[in-house]
């Protein structure tokens, strides 16, 4: 479980977003390198994360809960890391809007791309939301997309939730699941969330699957659950 503070309703989440991106980058420096980070390791060209969000009693009248998930794409010690941030149940840019999903790609302090899909605010009690986050390097281009999303409120989702941008990265060997855990958090209405978990991670290279981590990584769990 991340050590970040979990906000209950009545506090703004938006001022926390940029510090969390920087905290995510710093956290990666302190984590022991994964095997695929070794210099003789094959190049990682795609990483897939499976996520599960379990709600207890969302409240669409106050657009609660709100959360974001992150993927740090740069190397350890990179002063301007590439970070993907997904805002769930709200939009941050260009102005706040309740509901939906916004995908953002940051390079250091610069937001280089963003995409928002308008959806109704989460409202179904006891619903479980699942999705897959995929980041991929193809030459000098990095792409990110959400696929295979399922939700009681939103139904099947993922279409249109994607970004493509130029990048100086040549591989994703610097990716670490721990950085996603440290950078992701419930920013508003944490009392309405039972848990947020990365349920699986897969690394791919030019020849196919390199590593499959099927262990659950708990980002947040409501106290008492």
Image (tube, helix red, strand yellow):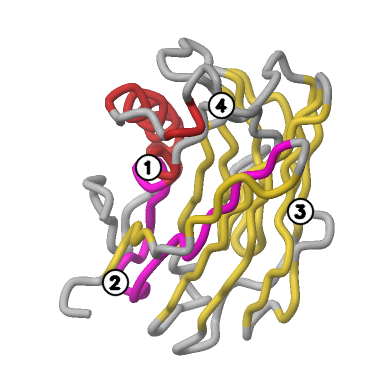
- Say if the magenta span includes residue 193: yes
Q: CA distance from mark 2 to mark 1?
A: 24 Å
Residue highlighted by disc 2: 191
Image location (x, y in percent) of residue 36: 51, 32
Which residue is pictured at 83% across the width and 22% down the height? 139
Which residue is pictured at 76% across the width and 57% down the height? 117
Dominant secondary structure of the magenta stretch? strand
Cβ atoms under marks 4 and 2 closer than 8 Å: no
Residue highlighted by disc 3: 161
Q: Nearer the viewer, residue 115 or 179?
A: 179
Cβ atoms under marks 1 and 3 closer than 8 Å: no
Image location (x, y in percent) of residue 170: 70, 19
Residue furthest toward the top? Answer: 79
Residue highlighted by disc 1: 178
Label 4 crowd bin: few (<14), some (14–19), many (20+), radius 10 Å = few
N-terminal label among 4 and 1: 4
Q: Which residues are magenta?
A: 181-205
- Quarter where residue 153 is shown: bottom right
SS for callout 4: loop
Q: Which mark is residue 120?
A: none
Residue highlighted by disc 4: 41
């Amino acid at each position: 479980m991340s050590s970040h503070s979990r906000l209950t309703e009545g506090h703004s989440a938006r001022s926390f977003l940029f510090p969390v991106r920087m905290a995510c980058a710093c956290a990666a420096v302190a984590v022991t390198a994964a095997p695929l980070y070794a210099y003789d390791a094959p190049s990682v060209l795609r990483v897939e994360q499976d996520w599960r969000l379990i709600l207890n009693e969302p409240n669409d009248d106050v657009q609660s809960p709100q959360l974001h998930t992150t993927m740090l794409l740069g190397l350890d010690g990179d002063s301007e890391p590439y970070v993907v941030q997904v805002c769930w149940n709200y939009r941050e840019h260009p102005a706040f809007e309740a509901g939906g999903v916004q995908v953002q790609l940051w390079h250091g302090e610069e937001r280089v791309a963003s995409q928002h899909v308008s959806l109704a605010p989460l409202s179904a009690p006891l619903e479980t939301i699942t999705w897959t986050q995929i980041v991929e390097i193809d030459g000098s281009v990095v792409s990110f997309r959400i696929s295979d999303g399922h939700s009681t409120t939103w139904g099947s989702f993922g279409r249109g939730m994607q970004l493509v941008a130029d990048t100086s990265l040549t591989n994703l060997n610097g990716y670490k699941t721990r950085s996603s855990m440290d950078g992701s958090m419930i920013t508003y209405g944490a009392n309405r969330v039972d848990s947020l978990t990365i349920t699986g991670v897969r690394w791919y290279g030019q020849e196919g699957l390199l590593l499959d981590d099927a262990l659950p990584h708990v980002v947040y769990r409501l106290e008492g659950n």
